[in-house]
């Protein structure tokens, strides 16, 4: 919506500029016509070209109010200006005519419309100037200078004044206004983006704090419970909350608020789980192989929870007591944009007959449910020792609502 509004404003500014130039050039052409006839004593060709351009351009400007096609109105006036300026140049001295500079204004107007039109009129006018020059240096000439000798200096002065004022007083002034307006709009947009980024950081910070509060409440609750099974359930829930809090903490700490560096996240999460379940001194080795991959929050959280469940199960049921063990976590992104997560341990594993449908283990059910949430697939590689999963998924892209 904001882009549409900005486009409409730019179109209105461009329309105002074209209409202003049209009115100015039409009035100047009609004044030039009268000066040629009554002050400069030019009675052939030139005053009638000025008259025709002035009248036809006023008609072109009037018709724009009905068809509303700025491109059509611009091209009509450009073609008329091109033809009229060429004729006046040919009949007022050819390559030596001061009116030849008006042709350059058509190029400026073209670039103010679009780059393609500017380039088109640039090469067209360069060709016309070369033809005028060729016509001036050859014996063959189908035009003659109709400006009387006594009026040449005044005609040159009026032509230069017309060109300079149109270039500076109309084009230059309005271009500066548009540039200032665009700069102001850009500054306002950048300021709004900065405000939203600050607000978003604050949101991530508060979410992280709230999740840590939930984790602390679960920890306090578990201290008043003697039943080991219930204590374990609360501890598992606490670790799940922490895994989500880590994502928000990383987004808050980094400049990029849309994605997190996943290697550092997985390393911090895995090390935390090892300390939480096995203690500060353990025989667990972490083999984490993740390149420079960044994931958005919609993918990072469910994938983090999946890794949390797999590592937790490995630490609690795969690598029992104080046994030595290794946990493998490998993440790769394929050329087709699909990610593959290989995660497992070299512990005792569990029977092939057990799966997420038949077991009562919440962790195993969550692993498969989270794989579905990632819109991916998960298989267990039973050829390897312990428990080993292969998860394939693609990054989730949520549609962001309009901020209009």
Image (cartoon, rainbow, N blue to C red):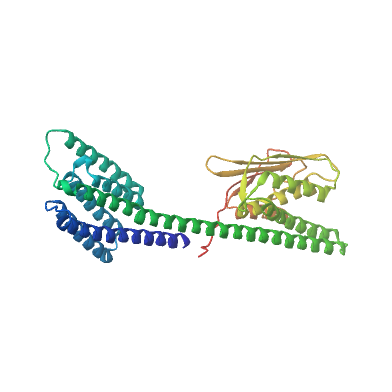
Identify the residue at image location x=40%, y=54%: 175
Which residue extends farthest front?
A: 150
What percent of the width, then of the height, locates residue 277?
Answer: 82, 50
Which residue extends farthest top?
A: 138
Tell me if I can see residue 359 in this picture: no
Q: Nearer the viewer, residue 237 or 253?
A: 253
Tell me if I can see residue 263 in this picture: yes
Horizontal placement of 41 versus 263: left or right? left
Q: Nearer the viewer, residue 137 or 272?
A: 137
Q: Nearer the viewer, residue 231 or 334?
A: 334
What percent of the width, then of the height, locates residue 54?
Answer: 21, 59
What percent of the width, then of the height, locates residue 201?
Answer: 66, 58
- Looking at the rendering, which quadrant does residue 224 occupy? bottom right
- Looking at the rendering, which quadrant does residue 10 occupy? bottom left
Identify the residue at image location x=18%, y=33%: 137
Q: Nearer the viewer, residue 356 or 1?
A: 1
As displayed, is residue 219 above or below residue 44?
below
As displayed, is residue 128 above or below residue 250?
above
- Looking at the rendering, which quadrant does residue 119 occupy? top left
Identify the residue at image location x=19%, y=61%: 55
Identify the residue at image location x=22%, y=47%: 153
User: Total number of numbered labels?
Assistant: 0
Horizontal placement of 78 versus 112: left or right? left
As displayed, is residue 137 above or below residue 220?
above
What percent of the width, then of the height, locates residue 373?
Answer: 61, 55
Horizontal placement of 294 versus 135: left or right? right
């Amino acid at each position: 919506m904001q882009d549409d509004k900005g486009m409409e404003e730019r179109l209105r500014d461009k329309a105002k500029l074209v209409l202003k130039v049209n009115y100015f050039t039409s009035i100047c052409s009609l004044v030039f016509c009268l000066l040629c006839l009554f002050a400069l004593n030019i009675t052939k060709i030139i005053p009638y070209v000025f008259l025709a351009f002035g009248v036809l351009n006023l008609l072109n400007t009037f018709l724009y109010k009905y068809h509303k096609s700025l491109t059509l109105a611009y091209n009509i006036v450009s073609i008329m200006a091109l033809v009229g300026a060429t004729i006046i140049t040919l009949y007022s001295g050819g390559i030596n005519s001061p009116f030849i500079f008006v042709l350059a204004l058509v190029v400026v107007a073209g670039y103010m419309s679009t780059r393609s039109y500017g380039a088109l009129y640039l090469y067209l006018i360069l060709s016309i100037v070369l033809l005028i020059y060729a016509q001036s240096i050859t014996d063959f000439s189908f035009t003659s200078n109709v400006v009387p000798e006594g009026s040449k200096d005044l005609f040159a002065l009026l032509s230069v004044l017309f060109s300079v004022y149109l270039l500076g007083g109309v084009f230059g002034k309005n271009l500066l206004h548009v540039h200032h307006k665009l700069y102001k709009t850009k500054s306002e947009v950048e300021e709004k983006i900065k405000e939203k980024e600050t607000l978003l950081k604050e949101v991530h910070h508060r979410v992280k704090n709230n999740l840590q509060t939930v984790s602390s409440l679960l920890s306090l609750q578990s201290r008043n419970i003697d039943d080991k099974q219930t204590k374990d359930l609360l501890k598992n829930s606490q670790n799940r909350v922490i895994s989500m809090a880590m994502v928000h903490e990383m987004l808050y700490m980094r400049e990029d608020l849309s994605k997190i560096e996943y290697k550092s996240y997985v390393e911090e999460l895995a090390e935390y789980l090892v300390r939480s379940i096995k203690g500060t001194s353990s025989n667990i080795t972490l083999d984490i192989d993740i390149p420079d991959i960044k994931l958005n929050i919609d993918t990072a959280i469910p994938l983090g929870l999946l890794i949390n469940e797999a590592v937790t199960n490995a630490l609690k049921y795969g690598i029992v007591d104080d046994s030595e063990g290794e946990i493998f976590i490998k993440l790769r992104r394929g050329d087709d944009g699909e990610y593959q997560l290989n995660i497992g341990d070299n512990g005792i594993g569990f029977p092939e007959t057990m799966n997420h449908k038949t077991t009562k283990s919440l962790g195993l059910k969550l692993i498969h449910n989270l794989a579905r949430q990632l819109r991916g697939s998960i298989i267990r590689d039973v050829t390897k020792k312990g428990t080993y999963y292969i998860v394939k998924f693609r990054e989730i892209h949520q549609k962001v609502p309009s901020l209009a």
